[in-house]
Amino acid sequence: MNCSFCSIAAGQTPAVIVREWDDALAIRPRSGGVNENHVLVLPRVHVDDAGTDPDVTAAVMRRAAELMAEHPAANLITSKGSAATQTVFHLHVHVVSRQDGDGLPLPWTPQHAARTTTTSQNGEAR
């Protein structure tokens, strides 16, 4: 299996590790993420997505909740399948800290709808 997150969990590929547990680790996204506190929480064992193994998913969610508790506001996001925007097929949960007016829209929020409308009317994103 050629899984980038398994390679990180095994210590074979470098990553910026924010926190480690016996069953999971939290890393910074290679892209830098959507803000400075964006982290990915992933299990040390390979699980394709949150629907594959409820016990592993619960453990990862528990670890993500520990990190989320450190922020006054945050999103907890995971995806299952390419139609749901999953691009790495190893369970991972995004913990994204938020603050009022940060301008970070989610696809189903009014902010995203307004941004999409503006983009389609002008042909460019604002």
Image: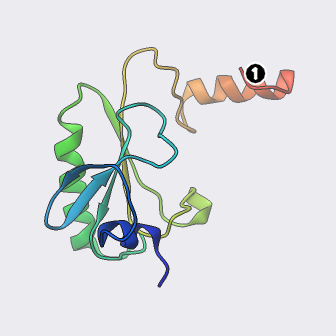
Q: Is residue 115 visible?
A: yes
The residue closer to the viewer here, 33 or 89, is 33
Q: Percent x, y for residue 100?
A: 39, 16
Location of residue 87 (image quadrant): bottom right
The residue closer to the viewer here, 61 or 43, is 43
Residue closest to the far left: 22
Q: Is 17 situated above or below 7? A: above
Colour setup of the view: rainbow
Q: Percent x, y for residue 32?
A: 47, 40
The residue closer to the viewer here, 13 or 116, is 13
Q: As drawn, is 12 to the left or to the right of 84?
A: left
Q: As drawn, is 21 to the left or to the right of 64?
A: left
Q: Amino acid at mark 1?
A: Thr
The residue closer to the viewer here, 86 or 109, is 86
Q: Percent x, y for residue 75?
A: 36, 38
Q: Residue shown at 13%/66% (left/top)? A: 22
> Which residue does the numbered mark 1 point to in the structure image?
118
Q: Quadrant of the C terminus?
A: top right
Q: Residues within 10 Å of mark 1 (few under 14, many from 20)?
A: some
- Identify the secondary structure beneath mark 1: helix
Q: Residue shown at 38%/59% (left/top)? A: 14
Location of residue 61 (image quadrant): bottom left
Q: Is 47 situated above or below 70? A: below
Residue closest to the far top: 101
Q: Is residue 51 visible?
A: no
Q: Residue shown at 47%/40% (left/top)? A: 33
Q: Percent x, y for residue 7?
A: 39, 72
Location of residue 125 (image quadrant): top right
